């Protein structure tokens, strides 16, 4: 398999020979973003996950080639000329240790059970082995995937590939926006909305809180990533709640609303994307206050529910805070990683 000719890999070629009307192709261009958005949404839904990535976000990702080669790392499955699924590989272009190569294979539910998704899955792994063989860095390298923990085909496929569980994620949700508990404001802090002069301090706090988490690395919090964050469509400072001690940011709840989800699911959902409090200000009720203040702000905007994600491992104190505010667990996810 050459870098530019992935559809001819043995796994895909064999599946095409055995499947009537089945063929595989590469990326045609940014116009494929529409079908990628629809395919991934329907595939995730069949696997128990409500998740929507907009065509706009996919186009931006295709144009940013820092963690993938769209010509070699994407392959589309077609039946009679109609796209029914696609597979993708992304990889860490930095010299981080460990380094993760991630992949997914999306397929419409009516075409499952015919070996198509399995072929794309194995083709992804073959592509990752090819990429990693060209990487001369000396650190640890892993293939990583994630699944919803309920019964679903993707989980079965991952576990059949000898991927050991690595860590777990909870999706928590606050649904009754009429019942928001009051929380006392900690003393000695300036509490309120974010100002432009706070952005660098907020980013520094994120780096302090999250750079050693399972899903992150110190390389994720550099100057380039800071600029990307500010340019993101989910950058909505008017929806955040922060706390300052003097001019230092010591706590933040970063919220955003995805309007595409509103159009798709018929309800307005907000996401508390990052909840972070500086070590010196923990166990003083600050996170509880910022979260309840966020919920009230979002309720007044007409939001129907609010979600947040948290790791299961070593997060008992954070879990107690979220549950004390009124969040409950909706679903759990497992991240798997095996050495390349």
Image (cartoon, grey):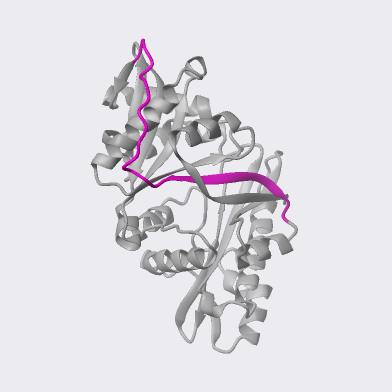
Residue 43 lies left or right of residue 253; in this view the side is right
Is residue 83 located in the magenta-colored stretch of the structure?
Answer: no
Can the viewer see residue 75? no
Residue drawn 61% across the image and 40% down it:
312
Q: Position of residue 254 (x, y in %)?
A: 38, 35
Residue 314 lies left or right of residue 161; in this view the side is left
Q: Is residue 86 above or below residue 54?
A: below
Q: Is residue 212 above or below residue 167?
A: above
What is the quadrant of the N terminus in the image?
bottom right
> Quick one: which residue is furthest to the left in this view?
301
Q: Would you say the magenta stretch is mainly helix, strand or loop?
A: loop
Residue drawn 70% across the image and 38% down it:
139
Which image quarter: residue 10? Answer: bottom right
Q: Position of residue 198 (x, y in %)?
A: 32, 23
Residue drawn 40% across the image and 33% down it:
226
Q: Nearer the viewer, residue 32 or 313?
A: 313
Q: Nearer the viewer, residue 213 or 186?
A: 186
Can the viewer see residue 290? yes
Q: Is residue 323 above or below residue 35?
A: above
Q: Is residue 35 above or below residue 180?
A: below
Residue drawn 34% across the image and 34% down it:
294
Magenta segment, which residues?
Answer: 163-189
Q: How many marks?
A: 0
Q: Nearer the viewer, residue 271 or 26?
A: 271
């Amino acid at each position: 398999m050459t870098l530019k000719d992935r559809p001819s890999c043995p796994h895909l070629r064999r599946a095409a020979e055995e499947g009537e009307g089945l063929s595989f192709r590469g990326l045609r261009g940014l116009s494929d973003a529409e079908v990628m958005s629809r395919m991934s949404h329907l595939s995730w839904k069949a696997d128990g996950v409500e998740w929507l990535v907009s065509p706009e976000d996919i186009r931006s990702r295709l144009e940013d080639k820092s963690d993938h080669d769209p010509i070699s790392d994407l392959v589309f499955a077609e039946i009679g000329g109609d796209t029914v699924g696609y597979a993708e590989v992304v990889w860490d272009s930095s010299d981080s240790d460990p380094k993760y190569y991630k992949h997914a294979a999306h397929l419409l539910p009516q075409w499952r059970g015919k070996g198509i998704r399995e072929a794309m899955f194995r083709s992804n792994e073959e592509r990752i082995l090819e990429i990693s063989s060209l990487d001369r860095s000396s650190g640890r390298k892993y293939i990583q995937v994630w699944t919803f923990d309920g019964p679903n085909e993707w989980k079965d496929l991952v576990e059949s590939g000898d991927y050991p569980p690595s860590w777990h994620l909870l999706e928590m949700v606050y649904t009754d926006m009429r019942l928001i508990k009051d929380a006392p404001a900690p003393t000695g802090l300036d509490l309120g909305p974010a100002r432009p002069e706070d952005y660098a301090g907020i980013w520094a706090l994120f780096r302090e809180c999250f750079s050693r988490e399972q899903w992150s690395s110190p390389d994720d919090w550099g100057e380039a990533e800071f600029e990307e964050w500010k340019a993101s469509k989910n950058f909505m400072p008017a929806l955040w709640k922060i706390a300052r001690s003097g001019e230092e940011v010591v706590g933040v709840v970063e919220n955003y609303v995805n309007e595409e989800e509103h159009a798709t699911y018929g309800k307005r959902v907000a996401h508390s994307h990052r909840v972070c409090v500086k070590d010196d200000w923990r166990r003083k009720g600050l996170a509880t206050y910022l979260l309840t203040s966020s919920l009230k702000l979002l309720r007044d905007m007409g939001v129907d529910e609010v979600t947040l994600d948290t790791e299961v491992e070593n997060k008992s104190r954070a879990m107690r805070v979220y549950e004390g505010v009124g969040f409950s667990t909706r679903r759990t996810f497992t991240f798997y990683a095996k050495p390349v």
